[in-house]
Amino acid sequence: MNTTTDNNSETLLLVDDNPTNLQVLYQTLEGHGYKLLLAKNGEDALNIASKVHPALILLDIMMPGMDGYEVCQKIKSDPLISDTVIIFLSALDDVEDKVKGFSVGAVDYVAKPFQADEVIARVETHIKIRQLEKTLEKKNKQLEVDNAIILESMGEGLLGVDKQGVITFVNPAGEKITGWQEEEMIGKNFHDLLMHTDKEGHRNPVEQDKILNTLQDSMGRHCDNDIFWTREGQSIPVEYTVTAIDGETDISSACVIFKSISERKEREKALNQALKTVEELKEKLQAENTYLQEEIRSEQNYGEIIGQSEALKKTMEEAQQVAQTDTTVLINGESGTGKESMARAIHQFSQRKDRPLIKVNCGAIPESLVESELFGHVKGAFTSAIKDRTGHFELADKGTIFLDEIGELSLDVQVKLLRVLQEHEIQRVGSGELIPVDVRIIAATNRDLKQMVEEGSFRMDLFYRLNVFPLTVPPLRDRQSDIPLLIAKFLDNLSKKLGKRLKGVSDVSMELLLDYDWPGNIRELQNVIERSSILSRSEIVEVDDALVPVSMAQSRQEESLEADVAGDDMSGASLSEPARTRTEYKTLAENEKQYITSVLDELNWVIAGKKGAAEILDVPASTLRSRMKKLGIERPD
């Protein structure tokens, strides 16, 4: 019996319920360089195998309890020891028994009574095969690691395509260039994934695909004027080389080496068309960013909503309550009262504040373009529709849309707006596709929509859809106590804008501003303060009377004052007829100036307050100051 010690000390497990057979097997294999373990039943064999993981098991079939077939099945089902080589030992020599043994995972079969040389030869053969398989597996793993290093170190993309045009592998550079992950690409059709559309946006014919052509005729190809489509839907210009890989009988696959040549194409000014496609795909995001940037750059109509008047507080409380919901809001108010600022405040208080507020002035859009602006259009919908356009409602998705001057919409557009409110979906002009939108609507108007409904110029159903939660922004004449606060805010903004220090307005100007009715509301006040600030030569701004027209009430008071002065002058003149002939006549303004000056002298030039000149003359202090300024009355030094 030959002996050897060159088996790398592989462990063998001998399993037989017959002690004599075990002893014979042990003696047969002893001295051949193996570590020999013994088991007298199936349970012991499984226990030893799970702990030791032998290279090979000589396994008896017919054993009490768990037979050899069951032991073999359990070992092969355990992933930790499933690679163990199993040779059955049995006196059963029928073909069916051998087939059953192979079916449960055995690799060989030795019949009892066995010959020692046969057992040694079969064991050595299968041990050698196992060692070769392990070596091959190790080399394959190392080869995979080496290949992976090579593929990862390549700056160019590399992918494989089988004869059916299906992607079989891609390297990390290819993933980076295309944006696709390997698992997303493998199994996908190369043409449908990367080359489905040409630079003009037309469907790319399969017969013109150079990669698929190479798979058909085995001719290598090089190209630098095609594009690949990335995962993000962007087209990138690429330069690629495709090479056929021969199989045993014909072409089995193709290898594509590619790289992005965007920078080169940009230098050659050939990337413009591809960038146009990218811009179209990003149009919605860019449009949203534009709106947000305009919001940041633009000065709000009235700065912020400022005021402490009861009228404004009531409106703001209602606005804060409705802001937390998605309820449609209709803001009513005169022109210049701050309806847009109120809409912005509602949006900022809402759960949609992180999404854009899209503002639409319905009265500023030409009738022919209103529908396109609101709902968008597709290319070719009308003569000037040279590309798809995203409408304001799509841009406002998940956010808020503010429809200012809602009463200016035509009845036709009102119908489509009503559909959006009811169905929460829009349809672009020229398209039959319905696009769902999640938009909170805030509308505003300075018109009487109820009256418009009665006149037939505004749809009743749309009115009730919009008028779910009406808010009325009070006019400035009803919140005069807020005027000083607004002026302070405007001056603070203007100090930065004009680069000059502005501390406030004079007392005379403040009274003048407080007495005015402000038919143009906050917008008019802002304009007056800005013009006065530009003209001001000091930190205290003086407001010119010409910028604030005299209100009707104030005009009547001034006329009354003039009449009183004239009456006093006339009564004094009637006392003495001779005196009239000796007195030089004065104009009404001169008499008024003289009378006011005399009252002021008498009262030590106290204008306002109790026993002031304004109270004596029965006019507001601001009116008296205005007349004094107009008549040139100044306190002597």
Image (cartoon, grey):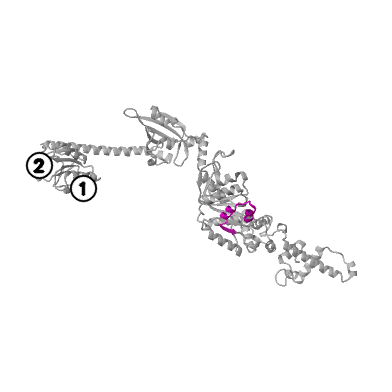
Residue 155 falls within the magenta-colored stretch: no
Quadrant hosting residue 583: bottom right
Which residues make up the magenta segment?
449-471
Percent of width and height locating residue 274: 50, 37
Q: Which mark is residue 314?
A: none
Task: Give the amino acid at mark 1.
Answer: Ser
Neighbourhood count class around disc 1 (C-alpha, 10 Å): few under 14, some 14–19, many 20 upward: few
- Disc 2, SS: helix
Neighbourhood count class around disc 2 (C-alpha, 10 Å): few under 14, some 14–19, many 20 upward: few
User: Eyeballing the image, is 602 above or below 371?
Assistant: below
Q: Residue under circle 2?
A: 24
Residues at marks 1 and 2, CA–CA distance in whole angstroms: 25 Å
Residue 463 falls within the magenta-colored stretch: yes
Percent of width and height locating residue 282: 51, 43
Quadrant hosting residue 491: bottom right
Q: At x 41% / y 31%, what residue is drawn?
A: 212
State the residue in front, 437 or 628: 437
